[in-house]
Amino acid sequence: MHLWTRLLTVSTALAVVLFTAGFETADARDRGKGARARSGGSHKEVTRTGAGGRSRSWQKDTSWKRGGGRGERDTTWTGQNGRTVNRKDRVERTGSGRERSTEWTGPRGGTASRHDSVQRTDTGRERSTTWTDRQGRQATRDATVTNDRESGTRTRDVTFTGRDGETRTRQDVTQRSDDGYTRSSTFTDKNGNTATRDAVVTRDPESGTRSKDVTWTGPEGGTRSRSTVTEKTDDGRSSTTTITRPDGSTVTWDEEIERD
């Protein structure tokens, strides 16, 4: 179980990003060469010895294939006890986006999976993600991003549905200004309670000053805020941050960073 948990949590984010980036780069080369399929593999063995002389070893075997707008990668980790964890990654380009799926199989045969679908729209993009755990329970996240270039507004709506069937939502509205931007966020939990976060960022290029003011308002109306002013110096930067708590008390700290 230790091998399953460790590999699932540590490798997921990095492996997906590297796999997708590698596929996209290589696939662009493939299209330039008549979509000729490419494939390969690798083998890695690792042994770690602790301070007490106790050693642990494992190996990683990977095979991959990509071309024609598709990519596949199969990875197997084998522990010193012979137990294995398998991972399958699949990526396929569609007319206006990309489909990506990942499936893990643990040492005891249990499986978990994730599926992502990203589609471009005329004004932004849509992303839908589904997670399925080893018990077959599912959670979903649906996000829609809409850009209005003329007004300088970007809106993102996210709905998350948990394995319990309850939904939570978040909406972010970002508005460009002449000297920065504003962002208003609204969070709604599964019981319909809402909380908000409002941020204002301003920049003064001439003086090298950047100010960021953020205010949070909780479901019961309590507020807290944080204000940070950052200024460039000859050899680095300085910043002053003030936090105001719901009871009105404040905390302030100053930071100086110098570069050689």
Image (cartoon, rainbow, N blue to C red):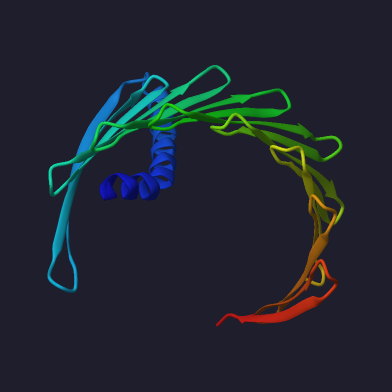
Q: How many marks?
A: 0
Q: Nearer the viewer, residue 190 or 20?
A: 190
Which residue is more in the foreground, 181 or 100? Answer: 100
Q: Residue at x 39, y 19 (%)?
A: 68
Instruction: Report x, y in % for residue 92.
Output: 44, 22
**Which image quadrant for residue 112?**
top left
Is residue 49 in view? yes
**Left or right, 98 with reference to 102:** right
Residue at 80% x, 64% y is: 225
* Residue at the (73%, 27%) spot, across then down: 123
Q: Position of residue 126 (x, y in %)?
A: 64, 27
Q: Nearer the viewer, residue 254 or 137?
A: 137
Give the vertical position of 99 relative to 23 (above or below).
Answer: above
Residue 83 quadrant: top left
Q: Quadrant of the C terminus?
A: bottom right
- Placement of 97 over or under 225, stated as above or below: above
Q: Position of residue 219 (x, y in %)?
A: 79, 49
Residue 82: x %, y % from top left: 13, 42
In the picture, residue 226 is in which quadrant?
Answer: bottom right
Give me the residue at 38% from left, 43% from top.
Answer: 15
Residue 13 vertical placement versus 111 (above, below): below
Q: Is residue 130 visible?
A: no
Q: Is residue 197 left or right of residue 79?
A: right
